Image (cartoon, rainbow, N blue to C red):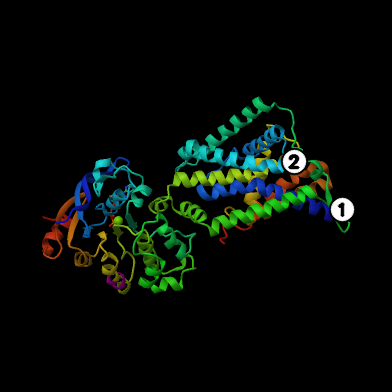
């Protein structure tokens, strides 16, 4: 296996007194696509927030390209090439579609992604580029959220439930675009409720249950019963 | 004709009120901070203008070249050093801390400059006037109004046409996600306060040329600023100018009826508008 780009070691996360993650160990290899699955409330979003430093960690809990980044600020983590497509899209309502994309690229990292490249990937966004982002449909907003993260030319991109609340046909479109997005040597962590989709796009997966890793394995070969057990915790 | 004159003078006075208000509006818009010390910072600007004019012998308008950067730097340090620590879910800490700051600034001014009223001397500009028909308009109020328009146009441009403005709006929308765009909100807030205090410096100097000032008058300027912001609608800079003008005109009309009614008429106009349109006249318009 190639060198890991990201290593989590005994990652804990808290909301006040409530502990949401317990000692997560996880590795993402350079160029690898990893799926994170788990029931509602398992801690998937919390995991994404911890990696992005939106929740504070101890330095050594998150290691990225040989550097302990767990205690950095979120903007410092972003500058190192980790981008998040957050759950629920979370576009900036005061910014137009194009401004949402431009601000994603403001970090100034070099790479293949630029406004023209995003517009080529999602042509509808070019048509709507001067509109307020909130005036778009859910699927179009999701495209902006993905584009905004790509504009940073990240080395590791985190997708948190990009199909949430979207019609099946749109989900199909977005997943059809994913290989083209991740193809360029980027590593990706994909949180997804739809297990079939998650396993189809990833090489390996981790299953979270109540804040702990209940199963990890190779996406292509895992048996469905094993996943159900790890997912719901039924013996 | 006297009434027309009162309305014109009131409108021009509104330019000064818009200058008082613009910094408040900007700070509230970007970081939801209500700055109780804003009026005292205006007065601080006037006193800095006084020191610069006496030491360097400059015209107060030229003193802006020195006072604006000083106030901007002070704003950045103040924000990063103190005010950022007070921002959070609870709205009380920033109110208390800026109230404390207000008291500190007043006392520091009292210690350094005494309680004697002071004035900035702009020479012939103060008495010059232009006649339009049978109306006579002071050059200074006209200039102040022109500066107010220029300042608001510049702020508007910064907000909607520059990378800094984009960062302000994004941070105002969603601080967490803005951090993910590589924006350090503490720095962004520092820049917003620097910009606000630059405007405050201009407001202070225009105030100091127009009337005499002493360390205690900050509170009154804060109220005028607040009223202009709220009349115009929160988060709308051009609305703030309209708010300032409405306030100025109401005061001028009140003074025309009875000189003792000037301030009262302004407050009444404010309360009436607040009762009819609790969000102000033009809340949160973009572009
Ligand atoms: N802001 C918060 N304050 C307190 N508890 C929280 C907060 N956010 C999440 N939690 C709790 O942390 C746990 C993990 O939540 P998280 O959002 O990470 O789950 P998830 O796997 O993303 O769920 P979903 O599939 O519903 O998005 C849950 O028990 C949740 O109630
Ligand atoms: Mg979630």
Chain letter, disc 1 residue: B
Asked if ligand 1 lies within 8 A of label 2, the reply is no
Secondary structure found at label 2? helix
Residue B247 visible at all = no
Q: Tell me the quarter of the picture where residue A72 sits.
A: top left
Q: Which is nearer the eye, B256 or A118?
A: A118
A107 left or right of B40 in image? left
To which residue does mark 2 refer? B209
Magenta stretch: give its range.
Answer: A172-176
Q: Tell me the quarter of the picture where residue A178 sits.
A: bottom left
- In the rendered view, tell whether residue A218 sits above or below residue A52: below
Q: Earlier in the sequence, mark 2 or mark 1?
A: 1
Chain letter, disc 2 residue: B
To which residue does mark 1 refer? B2
For mark 2, does the 10 Å Cα neighbourhood hold few (<14), some (14 to 19), or many (20 or more) residues? many
Q: Quadrant of the N terminus of chain B?
A: bottom right
Q: Quadrant of the C terminus of chain B?
A: bottom right
Q: Which is nearer the eye, A43 or A117?
A: A117
Q: Which is nearer the eye, A176 or B124?
A: B124
* Disc 2 to disc 1, C-alpha distance: 25 Å
Image marks 2 and 1: residues in contact by CB distance under 8 Å = no
Give x and y (percent) for residue B207: 71, 41
Is most of the magenta stretch helix, strand or loop? helix
Give x and y (percent) for residue A124: 41, 73
Q: Is residue A173 magenta?
A: yes
């Amino acid at each position: 296996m190639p060198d890991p780009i990201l290593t989590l070691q005994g990652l804990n996360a808290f909301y006040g007194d409530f502990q949401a993650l317990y000692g997560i160990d996880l590795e993402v290899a350079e160029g690898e696509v990893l799926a994170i699955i788990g029931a509602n409330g398992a801690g998937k979003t919390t995991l994404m927030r911890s990696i992005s430093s939106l929740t504070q960690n101890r330095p050594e809990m998150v290691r990225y390209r040989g550097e302990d980044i767990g205690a950095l600020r979120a903007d410092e983590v972003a500058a190192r090439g980790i981008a998040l497509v957050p759950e629920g899209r979370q576009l900036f309502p005061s910014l137009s579609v194009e401004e949402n994309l431009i601000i994603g690229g403001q970090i100034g990292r070099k790479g293949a992604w630029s406004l023209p490249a995003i517009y080529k990937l999602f042509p509808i966004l070019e048509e709507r580029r001067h509109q307020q982002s909130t005036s778009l449909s859910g699927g179009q907003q999701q495209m902006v959220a993905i584009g905004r993260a790509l504009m940073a030319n990240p080395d590791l991109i985190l997708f948190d439930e990009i199909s949430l609340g979207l019609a099946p046909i749109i989900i199909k479109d977005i997943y059809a675009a994913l290989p083209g997005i991740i193809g360029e040597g980027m590593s990706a962590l994909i949180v997804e409720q739809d297990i079939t989709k998650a396993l189809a796009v990833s090489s390996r997966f981790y299953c979270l249950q109540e804040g702990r890793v209940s199963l990890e394995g190779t996406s292509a070969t895992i048996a469905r019963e094993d996943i159900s057990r790890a997912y719901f915790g039924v013996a | 004709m006297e009434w027309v004159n009162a309305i014109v003078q009131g409108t021009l006075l509104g330019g000064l009120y818009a200058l008082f208000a613009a910094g408040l509006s900007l700070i509230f818009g970007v970081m939801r901070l209500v700055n109780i010390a804003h009026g005292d910072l205006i007065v601080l600007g006037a006193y800095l203008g006084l020191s610069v004019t006496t030491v360097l012998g400059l015209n107060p308008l030229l003193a802006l070249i020195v006072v604006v950067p000083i106030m901007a730097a002070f704003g950045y340090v103040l924000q990063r050093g103190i005010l950022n620590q007070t921002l959070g879910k609870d709205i009380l800490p920033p109110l208390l801390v800026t109230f404390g700051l207000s008291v500190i600034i007043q006392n520091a001014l009292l210690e350094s400059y005494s309680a004697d009223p002071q004035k900035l001397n702009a020479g012939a500009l103060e008495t010059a006037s232009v006649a339009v028909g049978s109306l006579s308009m002071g050059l200074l109020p006209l200039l102040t109004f022109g500066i107010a328009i220029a300042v608001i146009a510049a702020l508007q441009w910064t907000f909607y046409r520059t990378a800094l403005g984009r960062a302000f709006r994004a941070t105002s929308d969603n601080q967490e996600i803005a951090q993910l765009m590589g924006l350090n909100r503490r720095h962004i807030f520092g820049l917003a306060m620097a910009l606000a205090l630059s405007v405050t410096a201009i407001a202070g100097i225009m105030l100091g040329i127009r009337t005499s000032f002493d360390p205690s008058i900050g509170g009154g300027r804060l109220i005028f600023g607040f009223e202009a912001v709220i009349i115009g609608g929160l988060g709308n800079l051009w609305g703030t100018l309209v708010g300032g003008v409405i306030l100025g005109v109401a005061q001028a009309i009140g003074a025309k009826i009875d000189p003792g009614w000037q301030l009262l008429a302004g407050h009444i106009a404010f309360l009436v508008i607040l009762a009819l349109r609790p969000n102000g006249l033009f809340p949160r318009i973009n572009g």
